Amino acid sequence: MFFLGGCSSLPSPFNPKMFESFGYQVAELFEREKKVVIDEEELAALNALDEIPLLWKSRVGESGIARFHVVYEDNAIYAADEKGLLVSLDPHTGEEIWTVKTKYPFSAGVGVGEGILLTGTSKGEVLAYNTAGHTLWKAQVSSEILGLPQVNSDIVVVRTADARIYGLDAVDGQRKWVYQGATPTLTVRSSAGVAITQGAVFAGFAGGKMVAMSLFNGNVGWEAVVSQPRGVTELERMTDITSSPAIDDRLVCAAAYQGRVGCFQIIDGTQIWARESSSSAGLAMDSDYVYVTEDNGVLAAYDKRSGAGMWKQGKLGSKRLTAPLVDGHFIVLGDDKGFVNILRNYDGVVLARAATDGGAILSQPQRIPGGFIVQTANGGIFAFNSKF
């Protein structure tokens, strides 16, 4: 379900309960209009596929709203949950290496890199730990953290729900810079993060704009329009970028809800191509294609150089899919019914499928040695072998 938030159109003084009620009512109505029926023939074909081999499974706490990323780094797997649990697991067996039970309401994580583990909370706290689970520092930012915190070149980059991006010192959490993005009247509540490369931070915002800024001081290098609002009502005009951009050494690509997908030159933001699309989940790329998880359960592949449509796969048994993971010649997707699917990259044919615990998989699957791993809303952590 989408969670919508309003700003200037709400009466004053601000009433949180009214805000919450308004958001849920709009979201439910919109979702009914987008309903997709999954037919029995489609489900039968999926059930007949080869099963992706399970390597092991583990468990943390359930997640009501937050989208957690379970990640692999330096021969360990790290996971978190909404009750403040942070765990390290053996990547080969799933056995627990250590567990830290904190008092914090985690809402994002786990970000990892340069020997630091990062989580964010619903109260705007950024928490840093070392790879043994010991607390390094805590920093306060302006609001709830929904996107995955990241670290690069000794700078921690954190995005907040009020469209701010912070650069923090990775040593002690002190603020180095902050960028304020645009906040239209009506926006989609999302866990969009950022992409970092070549000393730059790339982020998409509500209203369809993408910004490139310096990792070291937050100064804006360029801005580009991925998608422009269209329609009459505020709901129709929403065209938010609700996922992290995809990057390589030359291009940065982003997709907007009710808008377009486009690719731009990293160096100056010049648009290479753009195509009509609607995505709230995200995208990924390899050397040939840009793969976009479009709305209503469709994965689409576009030529990376020209934007030409190559193929679409819409028979995956769900209307709500995760962002795609590119794993060699395969594409891996999770869905809201707890299934994972492996597709062939050059034509979108579904090759194999596996069930987890029935809980929704909300975040992009992540690579581990010899396979990939997902975390469900039920708290299940499942590691699969991609060599099926």
Image (tube, helix red, strand yellow):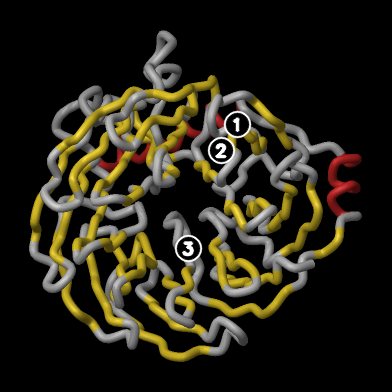
> Which callout, 2 or 3, points at the residue further toward the start of the chain?
3
Distance of label 2 from label 3 (alpha carbons) = 30 Å
> Which residue type carries mark 1?
Asp
295 on left or right of 195? right
Identity of the residue drawn at 87% across and 56% down: 49
Image location of residue 34, percent across then percent down: 62, 27
**What is the quadrant of residue 18 in the picture?**
top left
Q: Which mark is residue 63?
A: 3
Give yes or no for contact between labels 2 and 3 (Cβ–Cβ under 8 Å).
Answer: no
Say few, some or many: other residues with alpha carbon within 10 Å of mark 1 (under 14 / 14 to 19 / 20 or more).
some
Say which quarter of the image contains residue 113.
bottom left
Q: Left or right: where does residue 343 sit relative to residue 183? A: right
Q: Label 2 vs label 1: CA separation?
A: 6 Å
Q: Secondary structure at mark 3?
A: loop
Q: Residue at x 13, y 67 (%)?
A: 173
The residue pinned by badge 2 equals 290
Please, what is the three-letter code of the amino acid marked with disc 3? Ser
For discs 2 and 3, the disc positioned in front in the rendered view: 2
Instruction: Pick whichever, 150 or 8, lies toward us.
Output: 150
Q: Amino acid at mark 2?
A: Val
Residue in view at x 69 percent, y 78 percent: 55
The residue that label 1 is drawn on is 303
User: Could you tell me how far apart the alpha carbons at marks 3 and 1 are, in whole angstroms?
Assistant: 36 Å
Q: Position of residue 182 (x, y in %)?
A: 22, 30
Does residue 246 appear in the picture of this structure?
yes
13 to 336, vertically: above or below: above
Q: Do the CB atoms of the residues marked 2 and 1 lie less than 8 Å apart?
A: yes
